[in-house]
Image (cartoon, rainbow, N blue to C red):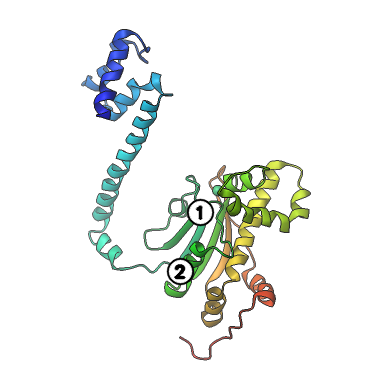
Amino acid sequence: MLFQWLHEVPAFAFQRGHIKHPLPITKSAAHICRAPHHPFPISCFDYFQLLLLPCKNTIAYKQFKSMNLYKKIFENNKKWVAEHKHADKHFFEHLAKGQTPEILYIGCSDSRVTAEEMTGVKPGQMFVHRNVANLVPNNDNNSAAVVEYAVAHLNVKHVVVCGHYNCGGIKAAMKAEDLGVLNPWLRNVRDVYRLHKDELDAIANNEDRSKRLVELNVEEQCINIMKMAVLQKHYLDHGFPTVHGWVFDLHSGKLIDLEINFVKKLHNIREIYDLGHKKSKKKR
Ligand code: CO
């Protein structure tokens, strides 16, 4: 129904002169499509997209664009399956057997900070949890369950909290604005600001202050992980996992290791948050 409508509306509108065609009619997209000598024939979706360009602020155009991306995802998946099968015909058999990831990655949900793509890890190598502003709040069952499962059951060797500069969640938490259900979530970032108020207030430039809050937020989330019983117990028994803080710089594409001194931090944390675990005599 939608496609029928999309097909008819542009033709009708062009005939009646309601909307201006983006190209002179003799060199229209239809001609490009049919031109036998054209090296890159465009798809029907691209053709419709071109026709609908003059109406790009309409709901119909936006619906069409989102359908285009939605359809492409399944096409991309088919290519991805084919590529992996071509490289290793047993790839998906191995994948289905189970996972032994070495890293737990906790990052922001931001669509630009793609955990697997920017780190180059393969399926099965990294256990991933993402939420707004990469938080691990003390009473959040969601992230706590992820850490528990990754540390106690998957035996990950590294736990990473990765923030990113220009984070919408961090910037929102720096504004005097009521954001409804986001308020209690972003209050965790405001708490980080309160803990480091003197340092942050001393930074005059807004952008630099927001960048520093991104880093301090990562550090505080690492500390929240170190407070957890499962982390302390597993580290005492096995010597891992270690906790790391990273920041992704959107402008350069580079990952920055904040080089948090995990052993020193954990030692300091245990003065207050010691949960009474002692190193087991028997090695498991
Ligand atoms: Co973000």
Q: Nearer the viewer, residue 89 or 63?
A: 63
Q: Nearer the viewer, residue 120 or 132?
A: 132
Residue 150 is tagged as 2
Q: Nearer the viewer, mark 1 or mark 2?
A: 1
x, y (%) of residue 166? 59, 44
Categorize mark 2 by other alpha carbons within 10 Å: few (<14), some (14-19), many (20+).
many
Q: Is residue 38 visible?
A: no
Please tell me whether mark 2 sits on a helix, a strand or a loop.
helix
Q: Is mark 1 within 8 Å of ligand 1?
A: no
Instruction: Say which quadrant the N terminus sits in.
Output: top left
Mark 1 is on which residue type? Asn
Q: Earlier in the sequence, mark 1 or mark 2?
A: 1
Distance from Cα at disc 1 to Cα at disc 2: 17 Å
Q: Is residue 175 visible?
A: yes
Please tell me whether mark 1 sits on a helix, a strand or a loop.
strand
x, y (%) of residue 136? 56, 61
> What residue occupies the far top of the structure in this picture?
16
Please count the marks in the image: 2
- Which quadrant of the structure image shows residue 16? top left
Residue 131 is tagged as 1
Please say if 1 is above or below 105. above
Mark 2 is on which residue type? Ala
Instruction: Say which quadrant the C terminus sits in.
Output: bottom left
